[in-house]
């Protein structure tokens, strides 16, 4: 699966990238169908502190793409929750 990662107002560190890769590996049951994963990370300083970090994932699979987005006060929490949402959506479409 090809990873396409973009950030807005977020410094992409090795730790963040490794966390994303680790979470995407847990979606390995989609590997046979997944063509690419587009991950977008954003830090919006204008939002309230509880909603400053967002993560969205679009998983391109045969058929309709799987998409989820989450906004949290912690970037890692947003990544974790959005990958859980993708997994739930994927199970519903299998």
Image: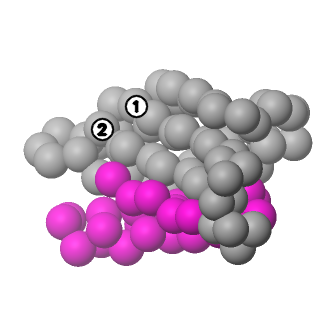
Residue at image point 17% right, 40% down:
62
Label 1, residues with CA under 10 Å away: few <14, some 14-19, many ≥20? some
Asked whether, in this view, residue 22 is left or right of residue 67, the answer is right
Q: Are marks 1 and 2 in contact (CB under 8 Å)?
A: yes
Q: Residue 86 shows which numbered tag?
A: none
Q: Position of residue 11 (x, y in %)?
A: 81, 32
Q: Is residue 86 magenta?
A: yes
Q: Quadrant of the C terminus?
A: bottom left
Q: In the image shown, does 63 or 85 lie closer to the viewer?
A: 85
Report if residue 25 is visible in the image: no
Asked whether, in this view, residue 36 is left or right of residue 74, the answer is left
Asked whether, in this view, residue 80 is left or right of residue 3, the answer is right
Report if residue 89 is visible in the image: yes
User: In the rendered image, which residue does mark 2 sit on?
Assistant: 60
Q: Position of residue 66 (x, y in %)?
A: 29, 52
Residue at image point 19% right, 66% down:
93
Asked whether, in this view, residue 3 is left or right of residue 11, the answer is left
Q: Is residue 7 magenta?
A: no
Displayed quadrant of residue 15: top right
The answer for how far apart the CA atoms under marks 1 and 2 are is: 5 Å
Q: Position of residue 67 (x, y in %)?
A: 33, 53
User: In the rendered image, which residue does mark 1 sit on?
Assistant: 36
Residue at image point 58% right, 29% down:
5
Q: In the image shown, does 74 or 21 lie closer to the viewer?
A: 74
Displayed quadrant of residue 61: top left
Which residues make up the magenta segment?
67-94
């Amino acid at each position: 699966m090809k990873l396409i990662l973009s950030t807005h107002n977020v410094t992409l560190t090795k730790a963040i990238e490794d966390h994303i890769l680790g979470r995407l590996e847990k979606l390995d049951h989609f590997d046979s169908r997944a063509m690419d994963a587009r991950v977008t990370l954003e830090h919006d300083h204008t939002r309230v502190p509880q909603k400053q970090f967002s993560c969205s994932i679009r998983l391109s699979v045969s058929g309709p793409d799987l998409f989820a987005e989450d906004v949290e006060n912690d970037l890692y929490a947003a990544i974790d929750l959005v990958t859980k949402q993708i997994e739930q959506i994927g199970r519903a479409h299998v």
